Amino acid sequence: MFIFDISNPLTLILMLAATILLIFLAQEIKKSYVSAIPLFLYLIMVVIHVAQSMTLSEEFSYLSATLARCIAIDFVFILISFFSYLWVDDIEAKKLGRKSIDNSLDWFWKKV
């Protein structure tokens, strides 16, 4: 059974670097949809990992710990991507002079 093991340290570092670069690109061009790309990819990955763990057969039961780590890491990356999306959306809204999607974190963005 093939799983995309993101608990591998090298894969984890590469995914973190790609996420940070996309967030930086979104912040520079002030387009929130660029920071939404990793968010959707991580949401798809968590769905795939959960589906794999739910349909895991007995012969691949040794992969359950790896899948659990992958799901936990997926949720961490979803959290990072979601906050970065809100941050870039706030930057884009200020640039265009319109209301942001969610203004409940204004106190936080002023400190960033």
Image (cartoon, rainbow, N blue to C red):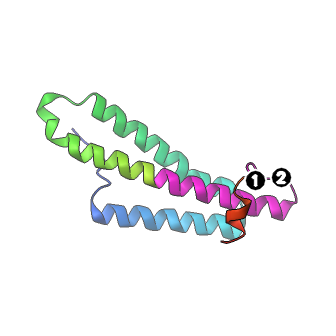
* Residue furthest to the left: 59
Disc 1, SS? loop
Q: Residue 98 location, x and y as percent?
A: 86, 55
Confirm whether residue 23 shows in the render: yes
Write down the region rendered in magenta. Answer: 77-103
Please name the residue shown 83% across and 52% down the image: 99
Quadrant where the N terminus sits is top left
Query: Residue 13 occupies which quadrant of the picture?
Result: bottom left
Is 53 left or right of 83, judged from the image as shown?
A: left
Tag count in the figure?
2
* Residue shown at the point (15%, 36%) measured from the top left: 60
Q: Amino acid at mark 1?
A: Asn
Question: Residue 42 or 2: which is nearer the viewer?
Answer: 42
Predominant SS along the magenta part: helix
Q: Is residue 13 left or right of residue 41?
A: left
Residue 16: x percent and y percent? 43, 64
Residue that carries the numbered disc 1 in the rendered image: 103
Secondary structure category for the residue under label 2 = loop
